[in-house]
Image (tube, rainbow, N blue to C red):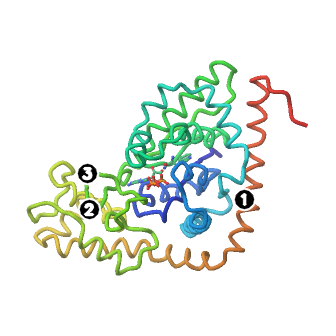
Amino acid sequence: MKTAFSGIQPTAIPTIGNYLGALRNWVALSKTHRCVYSVVDMHAITVRQDPENLRKRVREVYALILACEPDPENTVLYVQSHVAAHAELSWILSNYTMFGELNRMTQFKDKSAKHADNINAGLFTYPVLQAADILLYDADVVPIGEDQKQHLELARDIALRFNGIYGNVFVVPEPMIPKTGARIMSLLDPARKMDKSDPNPGGYISMLDSRDAVITKCRRAVTDSGSDVRYDPVEKPGVSNLMTIYAICTGKTLEETESDFAGSGYGAFKTAVGEAADALLDPIRRRAQTLIQSPTHLDRLMAREAERAHAVADPVLRRVREVIGLLPRK
Ligand code: ATP
Ligand code: LTN
């Protein structure tokens, strides 16, 4: 069985963008791969977090992933900071990553602009920790949205550089980016990606939004002038984004979506998008709400899963320590 690894930040409740771009594939891969999935709390602290809120979010995001029902036989789901090997490998790999490489990362540039008062070193070295996450589990494939492609390429470059010096220590991972849904755009600004940390909640559909909120947000989504429901991301980015959401939620093609709404106008179309999104999210939301009510159960699961993750990561870390010449730890 090949291995898949991916992570999600507990910065906010995941959105339908996170689901369609990434989580949906996490679940699909769990049928055919050994999967290791992580709530990456150490990545989340590159942006200032309220401690109480962070604890709450980690449990909520963990519950939401469980509620998406990846196959438990093949899946390890753990909290990143519970496995110390991530921090250690990240430090080691930072010595095999060039300043110029990190300086080209568009996520760093975007987040620096957004958090101009806190452009810290962790924000800069964030992709090194991400490379450590992936390489620690000998991952063959990494299911992600389009925005993470550049980080994955860097992780591959680091692995190849390291292997070039020390032999085949790391598996070089491949990204898995879906053909549709890899970049769901904001409902209020179709030029920007839908972001779970958007200060305006009207821009995203959270996976825990109520049915009413989902439908209202879709009805208020920015569309384009004209009235035909036609897929054209350049001329009609707002409508095309809603069509993508509708098509994936209902399992229809974009052509079928176009013909379903021929001549019906934007009003009816937007309501139908909201209903389709709600139908997809409703069972996940219900399961997640039940799990969130039992924090002690979640904490017990997290402890068990951290041990399982540690058992995979530790031999890889030992391999790395040995090839670079660190004396073994007794
Ligand atoms: P933040 O706003 O805190 O940076 P985010 O919404 O970008 O969060 P992440 O936790 O960074 O979410 O990403 C989790 C996964 O979801 C990643 O694989 C990422 O590529 C994917 N993803 C994020 N936003 C979108 C989107 N708008 N469309 C499709 N996939 C997305
Ligand atoms: N950087 C990613 C989250 C992330 C990740 C990973 C994704 C951290 N570690 C390892 C895939 C593999 C993000 O911002 N979406």
Q: Which mark is residue 191?
A: 3
Q: How many neighbours does mark 3 have within 10 angstroms: few (below 14), some (14-19), or many (20 or more)?
A: few
Judge depth for marks 3 and 1 and give the one in front: 3
Q: Nearer the viewer, residue 225 or 188?
A: 188
Q: Amino acid at mark 2?
A: Leu
Instruction: Please give the residue where the numbered disc 2 appears in the rendered image.
Output: 188
Q: Nearer the viewer, residue 224 or 192?
A: 192
Q: Residue at x 35, y 77 (%)?
A: 213
Asked where in the image residue 107 lies, by quadrant, the reply is top left
Where is residue 291 drawn, in percent x and y? 61, 75
Q: Please tell me whether residue 285 is drawn above or below residue 325 in the rendered image.
A: below
In the picture, measured across the screen, residue 285 lies left or right of residue 41, that is: left
- Cα distance between the residues tagged 2 and 3: 9 Å
Q: Residue at x 58, y 25 (%)?
A: 160
Instruction: Please give the residue where the numbered disc 1 appears in the rendered image.
Output: 305
Where does the C terminus fall, quadrant-wise?
top right
Q: Residue at x 16, y 70 (%)?
A: 266
Mark 1 C-beta closer than 8 Å to ligand 2: no
- Cα distance between the residues tagged 3 and 1: 39 Å
* C-beta proximity under 8 Å, tags 2 and 3: no
* Element under disc 2: loop
